């Protein structure tokens, strides 16, 4: 048994057929198909769905965005569209988890907190990547971090120490913000337990 769910209740036949086609193309039936049973769950229409015109003030078509997400879910599964939700955790990678994202909404920025300089965004890798075991860091010399094609690191800020985990597994990381000759700002750390450097993400 499998199911396909549009972004919202709809009477658009073409949209439903498109979602079914995308989803069925991902399924495999080694023994063949002997019977197909199709069930539709109905829901009452809302006045907004039945209205002919959208608001003139609407600049982004959220319905089109939700239809696009529904296509992705139909082809790749319900957990293919997610957003990060914060949670309690000691390590940076344990301070969020992925939650299924069902519907797009309009942003509601806090105008009072908006500054002229936009905040930097720290993009984490899904898993910290080990750098060369031969790295030797010197504040007086530039050094390579991932081969010659990636260039050298020309400036290091830190260390910002993160320790703990004695209740499960001891952790001792020394984080640095490293600027490369190409202008990239990397977030790297030295793991005292493993005696090795890792790159955890970048700052944009």
Image (spheres, grey):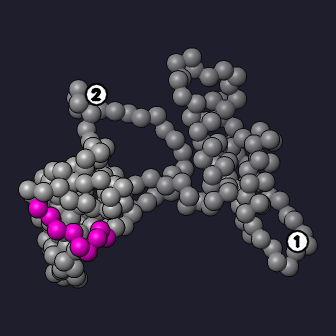
- Does 44 sit left or right of 184 as displayed? right
Where is mark 1, residue-wise? 33
Where is mark 2, residue-wise? 111
- Does 38 sit left or right of 42 as displayed? right
Residue 110 in the image: above or below residue 68: above
Q: Residues within 10 Å of mark 1 (few under 14, many from 20)?
A: few
Q: Compute the Cα span from label 2 to label 1.
A: 56 Å
Of residue 200 and residue 107, the one placed in the foreground of this image is 200
What main secondary structure does the magenta stretch of the protein show? Answer: loop
Q: Please name the residue shown 77% across and 71% down the image.
A: 28
Mark positioned earlier in the residue sequence (2 or 1):
1
Q: Which residues are magenta?
A: 130-138
Position in image of residue 169 (x %, y %): 22, 82
Position in image of residue 141 (x %, y %): 13, 57
* SS of the residue under disc 1: loop
Residue 137 among magenta residues: yes
Of residue 133 and residue 174, the one placed in the foreground of this image is 133
* SS of the residue under disc 2: helix
Quadrant containing the C terminus is top left
Q: Please name the residue shown 57% across and 17% down the image.
A: 56
- Does 9 sit left or right of 170 as displayed? right
Number of callouts: 2
Mark sitting on residue 60: none
């Amino acid at each position: 048994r499998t199911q396909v769910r549009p972004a919202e209740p709809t009477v658009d036949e073409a949209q439903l057929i498109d979602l079914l086609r995308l989803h069925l193309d991902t399924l495999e039936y080694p023994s063949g198909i002997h019977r197909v049973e199709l069930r539709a769950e109905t829901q009452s229409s809302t006045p907004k769905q039945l209205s002919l015109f959208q608001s003139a003030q609407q600049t982004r078509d959220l319905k089109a965005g939700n239809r696009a997400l529904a296509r992705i879910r139909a082809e790749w599964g319900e957990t293919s569209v997610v957003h990060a939700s914060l949670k309690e955790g000691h390590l940076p990678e344990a301070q969020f988890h992925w939650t299924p994202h069902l519907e797009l909404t309009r942003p509601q920025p806090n105008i009072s907190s908006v500054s002229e300089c936009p905040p930097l965004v720290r993009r984490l890798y899904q898993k910290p990547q080990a750098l060369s075991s031969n790295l030797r860091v010197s504040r007086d010399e530039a050094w390579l971090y991932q081969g010659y094609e990636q260039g050298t690191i020309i400036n290091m800020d830190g260390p910002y120490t993160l320790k703990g985990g004695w209740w499960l597994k001891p952790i001792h990381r020394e984080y640095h913000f490293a600027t490369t000759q190409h202008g990239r700002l990397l977030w790297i750390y030295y793991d005292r337990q493993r005696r090795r450097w890792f790159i955890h993400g970048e700052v944009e």
